[in-house]
Amino acid sequence: MIKILKKELIIYTALLTLLVVLMHPDLLSHPTARLGLMQEKGNYIHPLLYTFFVYLILYFLRFVVRYIVKLVRKK
């Protein structure tokens, strides 16, 4: 169980990092400016929410692919 949780946490963290870099490329060049903007607007939670929704979509797709592979292997 812990192994599965670690795997999913790594996937979530990698997805969070990827989405942050894709949505806010200025975070790499000026991280303090981006964090200052987040502090002004008080929107700390939105990256986690967006990542959670994308993670759910990917989890569903992974589940469907796993199910299809099991069906193909049975035949």
Image (cartoon, rainbow, N blue to C red):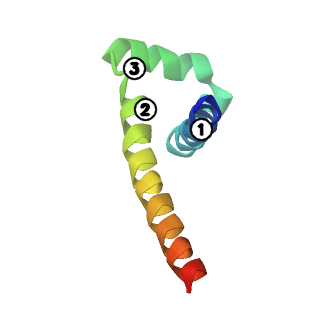
- CB under 8 Å between discs 2 and 3: yes
Q: Is residue 34 left or right of residue 39?
A: right
Comes first in the chain, label 2 or label 1? 1
- CB under 8 Å between discs 2 and 1: no
Q: Residue at x 34, y 21 (%)?
A: 43
Category of crowding for the residue at label 1, using alpha-carbon neighbours closer than 10 angstroms: few (below 14), some (14–19), many (at least 20): few
23 versus 35 height, above or below: below
**Residue 36 tag number:** none
Q: CA distance from mark 2 to mark 1?
A: 23 Å
Q: Residue furthest front?
A: 74
Q: Residue at x 60, y 41 (%)?
A: 11
Q: Is residue 63 left or right of residue 22?
A: left
The residue carrying mark 2 is: 47
Q: Is residue 40 left or right of residue 17?
A: left
Comes first in the chain, label 1 or label 3? 1
Of 40 and 22, the residue lying toward us: 22
The residue carrying mark 3 is: 44
Q: Nearer the viewer, mark 2 or mark 1?
A: 1
Q: Residue at x 67, y 30 (%)?
A: 29
Quadrant placement of the C terminus: bottom right
- The amino acid type found where label 3 is placed reads Tyr
Q: Residue furthest bottom?
A: 75
Q: CA distance from mark 2 to mark 3?
A: 7 Å
The residue carrying mark 1 is: 4
